[in-house]
Image (tube, rainbow, N blue to C red):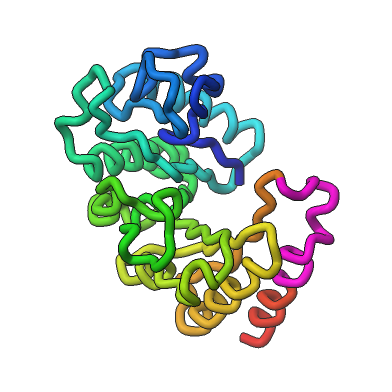
Amino acid sequence: MPQFNCLGHQGINTCRYPLLELHRNFDETPGHDDIPTRAWCPQHPGVMPVVLPLIDEIIDVFEADAFHVGMDEVLQIASPLCPRGCAQHNPAELFAGVVSELRAHITEERKLPMLMWGDRLVPQSAIPGATNHEASANGTHAAIHLIPRDITVCDWRFRSSRDYHGVYPSIRHFLDHGFKVWPAGGWLWENASPFSQHALELRKQTPDVLGFLCTTWNHIAPLKAPTSPSIRDILPLWENAEQAT
């Protein structure tokens, strides 16, 4: 189940990741170096003819059963710095357009389930304590009404429950909008465990909470991941819950 970062996570400040390094005209904010989270332009006609064959190659090499398109932390969208006039368009519609185009290729053409991160689909005001990286502060959240419901939303919450004032409304937000949800915890057990417990309670109410996605985000060496408390101590709770049902 490979992942490829789409739209966002294309570079940091002067560092452009390979897609934008090779195709600088794809950049939403070309010619500007002080951009902390780069993105490709959702209106550039040349992006998908490059990206979709890349996705096809990844699907084939991994013999993928599903595909994760990323789509998280897209802070640069509908930017006034975009030479293609993105600022004149609704950010939710721009975001939903990319999601829908990716889904048309991955799900309709390649017949694979598509997953994506959910932070751009929930407003920052709906999650107490959330930053603009963890939830949308730039209007993309309305895209939740515009994208197909057969996409699995991976809902990541990495900080402590104290940072979120002890509540996690995002899973219910996605369920209420008709999506299947795969909650994702952080690499620290003390942060992941409360979110896992919340997700597990919701799982008892609906099978649309698919499980719990344990992550490392390069904070844990791959060979040490199976013994990391955030994985070792949490996965058995879900396994036991599944056996009980």
Q: Is residue 9 above or below residue 168?
A: above
State the image coordinates of residue 237 (x, y, percent, origin top left): 70, 78
Q: For this view, does 102 lie left or right of residue 199?
A: left
Q: Residue furthest bottom?
A: 244
Q: For this view, does 25 lie left or right of residue 221?
A: left
Q: Is residue 186 above or below residue 35?
A: below
Q: How many marks?
A: 0
Q: Residue furthest left?
A: 88
Question: Which picture quadrant has residue 236?
Answer: bottom right
Q: Where does the magenta region start and end?
A: 219-235
Q: Is residue 138 above or below residue 36?
A: below
Q: Nearer the viewer, residue 172 or 83?
A: 83
State the image coordinates of residue 57 (x, y, percent, origin top left): 57, 27
Please name the residue shown 76% across and 50% down the image: 220
Asked if residue 226 is among those painted magenta in the image, a careful observer would answer: yes
State the image coordinates of residue 135 (x, y, percent, origin top left): 39, 55
Please name the residue shown 57% across and 41% down the image: 3
State the image coordinates of residue 102 (x, y, percent, origin top left): 39, 37
Q: For this view, does 156 lie left or right of residue 62?
A: left
Prevailing secondary structure of the magenta residues: helix
Quadrant of the drawing holding the C terminus: bottom right
Q: Nearer the viewer, residue 196 or 112?
A: 196
Q: Is residue 97 above or below residue 213?
A: above
Question: Which picture quadrant has residue 38?
Answer: top left
Please name the residue shown 59% across and 31% down the image: 58
Q: For this view, does 72 lie left or right of residue 239?
A: left
Q: Nearer the viewer, residue 159 or 50?
A: 159
Please name the residue shown 30% across and 40% down the image: 95
Asked if residue 165 is among those painted magenta in the image, a careful observer would answer: no
